[in-house]
C-alpha cells in the first residue's frame, strides 16, 4: 500500500519558475543569497493579503476580524496585518509591545492568557487594552491597579464554556481548563465587575483551534452565541464585544483538505440576525492566527551532507527541530506525520528517491522529513518546509545545542 500524499493544492501553493520555487515572486536561490544565510523563515505578504481577502469575501461584513499575534509575532508580519484586520489579540506583554508599535488603536486590542503578571496587567490598563479576565484573581488585580492608576480598566470575561469544539486539534474550552472562568462561575464574576465599576466590554469564548470541519465550527459558534445570551442577562452593562474565537485550521498532513469557509459564513449571517435582536450593540469578533499566516510561510534549510545508511538515504541539513519543532513532530503530534516538504531548487525534477531529511543535532528526534519521496538532492540544495508561517520560529527551542539562530524575512 502506497503512503498517502499531500494534496496538490498544498504542494503547488507557491509558483515555480525555471525549476525553482518563487517566494514573494523571488526565486528561492536568489532569496537565500539575499537573506545571506540558511536556515531562514520567509513569509509571503501577498499570500497573507489574499487570505484576509478570502475571509472578507465569505464572512459577513459585520464580522470584526482579529489577528491572534501568538501565531506569528514577527513585527513586520504584525505591521502588515495592521492594515488588513480590525484588531489584534495578545497572549503576552511582549506581544502587546509589538501591537502598540503598529497603527492599530488600543481600542481594538485585547489581551488573553492565564497567569498575566501585575506588570502586564498594569501595562494593558495604561495602554487602554482590553483585559480578557481568566480568573477572579486577575479581576481583583485589575481593579486594584485600575484604582492606583486612576484609569478605569477595560475588561472582558474569558469564558470556559460547557462545550468543546469537536475534532479540534487543540481544545481550549470545555471540561476543566486553565483557560478562562467556568461558565457557571461567570454570573458571580459579572456581579463583582459591576461592584468594582470597571469598564465591562463583553465576552471571549474560545472553544478550540486547528479544525478543518466546517460543521464542527458552525456547531461551536451556535453554542457560543447561546451561551453569550444566557450570560448577558447578568452583565453589569451592555455587551459591546463578543469574541467567538476562531478554530479555523489549515491542512498540514496527507489526506487533509482545506477548510470550506462558505458554509460558515452562510450560517453566521443567520446567527447575526438573531444577535441583532438579543445583543444589538455587540460587535462580533472572530480571532484567527494560524489561518491567516500559516500557509504564507516557509522554512528553508540547506543540505550539507548526503549519506546512505543500510540503504536508507539521509539528507543532512543545517536546520532541524531546534528551529522548527513542529515539523519534527514534537509539538503536539501523537503519531508523527510529515509536513509538506520540497527540494525548492529542484522543482520538476523527474528523478526521485525515498529520503529522510535530518538536522545537525545529536538526537534521533531531529527529523524534518521521514522517508519521503523527494527529488534526488545533494549538498547545496535547498529543502523547503511548507505551512510554516505559524508556530514555527517562536515555538522552537533555539538554544538547544547552541546552534545559530535562523533568520526571518517578509517578502
Image (spheres, rainbow, N blue to C red):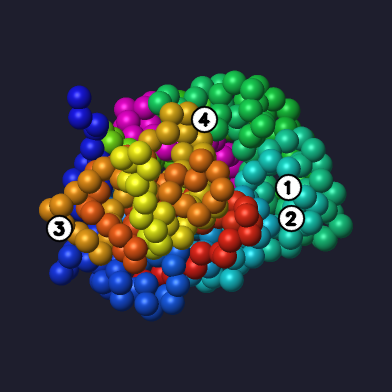
Q: CA distance from mark 2 to mark 4?
A: 25 Å
Number of the front mark, 2 or 4: 4
Callout 2 touching callout 1 (CB < 8 Å): yes
Residue 46 as seen in the image, left or right of residue 79: left
> Which of the 4 quarters of the picture holds residue 7?
top left
Q: Looking at the image, which residue is at 83% across and 61% down?
A: 149
Q: Where is residue 196 drawn, in percent x and y?
A: 80, 43
User: Looking at the image, can residue 156 be seen?
Assistant: yes
Relative image position of residue 211 (x, y in whole percent): 39, 34
Q: Is residue 206 magenta?
A: yes
Reading the image, the residue beneath label 2 is 120
**Marks 2 and 4 close (CB-CB < 8 Å):** no
Identify the disc placed on residue 348: 3
Q: Mark 4 sits on what residue?
A: 171
Could you tell which of marks 3 and 1 lies nearer the N-terminus? 1
Tell me the residue at 67%/49% (across/down).
131
In 3D space, how far apart are the residues under numbered discs 4 and 3 (Cα atoms)?
40 Å
* Residue at the spot of label 1: 116
**How far across and down, in percent of the image, does residue 203 sit?**
58, 39
Amino acid at each position: 500500500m502506497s503512503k498517502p500524499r499531500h494534496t496538490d493544492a498544498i504542494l503547488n501553493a507557491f509558483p515555480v519558475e525555471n525549476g525553482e520555487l518563487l517566494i514573494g515572486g523571488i526565486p528561492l536561490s536568489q532569496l537565500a543569497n539575499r537573506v545571506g544565510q540558511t536556515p531562514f523563515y520567509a513569509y509571503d505578504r501577498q499570500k497573507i493579503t489574499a487570505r484576509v481577502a478570502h475571509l472578507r469575501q465569505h464572512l459577513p461584513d459585520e464580522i470584526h476580524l482579529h489577528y491572534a499575534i501568538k501565531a506569528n509575532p514577527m513585527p513586520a508580519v504584525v505591521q502588515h496585518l495592521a492594515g488588513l484586520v480590525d484588531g489584534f489579540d495578545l497572549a503576552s506583554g511582549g506581544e502587546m509591545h509589538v501591537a502598540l508599535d503598529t497603527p492599530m488603536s488600543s481600542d481594538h486590542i485585547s489581551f488573553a492568557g492565564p497567569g498575566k503578571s501585575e506588570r502586564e496587567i498594569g501595562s494593558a490598563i495604561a495602554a487602554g487594552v482590553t483585559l480578557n479576565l481568566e480568573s477572579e484573581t486577575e479581576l481583583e488585580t485589575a481593579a486594584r491597579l485600575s484604582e492606583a492608576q486612576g484609569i478605569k480598566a477595560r475588561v472582558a470575561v474569558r469564558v470556559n464554556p460547557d462545550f468543546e469544539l469537536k475534532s479540534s486539534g487543540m481544545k481550549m474550552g470545555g471540561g476543566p481548563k486553565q483557560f478562562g472562568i467556568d461558565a457557571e462561575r461567570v454570573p458571580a464574576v459579572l456581579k463583582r465587575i459591576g461592584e468594582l465599576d470597571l469598564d465591562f466590554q463583553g465576552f471571549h469564548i474560545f472553544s478550540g483551534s486547528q479544525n478543518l470541519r466546517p460543521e464542527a465550527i458552525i456547531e461551536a459558534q451556535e453554542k457560543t452565541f447561546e451561551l453569550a445570551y444566557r450570560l448577558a442577562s447578568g452583565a453589569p452593562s451592555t455587551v459591546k464585544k463578543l469574541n467567538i474565537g476562531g478554530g479555523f485550521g489549515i491542512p498540514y498532513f496527507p489526506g487533509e483538505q482545506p477548510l470550506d469557509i462558505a458554509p460558515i459564513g452562510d450560517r453566521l449571517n443567520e446567527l447575526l440576525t438573531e444577535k441583532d435582536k438579543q445583543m444589538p450593540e455587540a460587535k462580533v469578533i472572530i480571532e484567527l492566527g494560524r489561518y491567516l499566516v500559516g500557509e504564507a510561510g516557509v522554512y528553508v534549510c540547506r543540505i550539507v551532507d548526503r549519506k546512505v545508511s543500510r540503504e536508507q538515504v539521509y539528507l543532512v541539513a543545517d536546520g532541524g527541530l531546534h528551529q522548527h519543532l513542529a515539523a519534527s513532530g514534537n509539538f503536539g503530534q501523537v503519531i508523527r506525520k510529515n509536513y509538506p516538504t520540497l527540494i525548492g531548487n529542484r522543482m520538476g525534477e523527474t528523478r526521485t528517491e525515498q529520503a529522510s531529511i535530518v538536522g545537525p543535532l545529536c538526537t534521533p528526534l531531529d527529523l524534518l522529513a521521514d522517508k519521503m519521496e523527494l527529488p534526488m538532492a545533494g549538498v547545496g540544495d535547498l529543502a523547503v518546509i511548507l505551512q510554516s508561517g505559524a508556530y514555527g520560529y517562536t515555538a522552537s527551542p533555539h538554544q538547544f545545542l547552541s546552534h545559530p539562530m535562523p533568520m526571518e524575512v517578509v517578502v
